[in-house]
Image (cartoon, rainbow, N blue to C red):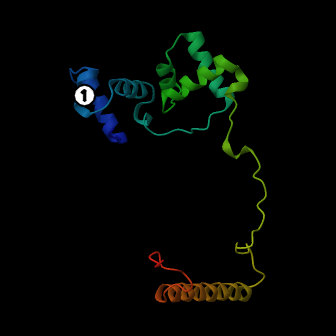
Amino acid sequence: MKTFTKEEKHQAVHRYLNEMISYNELAKEIGVDSSALRYWVKLVKYHGDLAFTTPYTNYSPAFKLKVIQYIEEKGYSIREASAIFHIPDYSMVRRWKRKWENGGVEALESKRKGDFLMPARKNKKNEQPTSFKSVEEEMEYLRMEVAYLRSLNRILEEEKKSPSKGKKSKRSSN
């Protein structure tokens, strides 16, 4: 599906509001789902020129609960509430509501990936040390590494050039 710029979204909403054209006709013409077009119209209705500026997207559990309570108490649809609260994707609110229905307020808590400690890595033999005491020490290490790689490369080149020693041919005569 095509990605639309803010300007293209505003133009589509303007056309819908000012021309005698249905959601389905306009959506088909510009290549977007009609439900997305309806959502754009709602965003513009509630937020005007700021409708397509992306707001802060890390919502607190209290905010999520407020949106859900608004839906429950006022009878608004998920899309309508998403537009009112300027949430860029109404499916987020659908997920929040489902979590709340299944697990209550605690289920709305953020389970971010960075909230746990990583186990300490042990330095392996072939790993480069993470820090050096001086620039000279690092240069010495890098020179040794380059020398090692050159000698390894030379050995591999010699093996390619010379036929393998001690291997019997597969066509040995019996």
The local secondary structure at tag 1 comes to helix
- Residue at position x 67%, y 27% from top? 108
Find residue 19 and report its horizontal and vertical position in percent: 21, 24
- The residue where tag 1 is placed is 28
Determine which quarter of the picture holds residue 16.
Answer: top left
Numbered label tally: 1
Residue extending furthest toward the front: 174
- Residue at position x 31%, y 39% from top? 8
Residue 7, compared with residue 95, is above or below; it is below
Give 166 or 130, whichever is nearer the viewer: 166
Find residue 162 and report its horizontal and vertical position in percent: 49, 89
Residue 54, compared with residue 18, is above or below; it is below
Residue 44, compared with residue 172, is above or below; it is above
Find residue 75 and report its horizontal and vertical position in percent: 53, 10
Q: Quadrant of the N terminus?
A: top left
Left or right of residue 170, residue 152 in this image: right
Q: Within 10 Å of the Cα at label 1, are there few (<14), some (14-19), or many (20+) other Cα atoms?
A: few
Give 11 or 135, whichever is nearer the viewer: 135
Left or right of residue 75, residue 61 in this image: right
Find residue 45 and report its horizontal and vertical position in percent: 40, 24
Q: Amino acid at mark 1?
A: Lys
Residue 50, compared with residue 95, is above or below; it is below
Left or right of residue 70, residue 144 in this image: right
Give 43 or 126, whichever is nearer the viewer: 126
- Residue at position x 20%, y 20% from top? 20
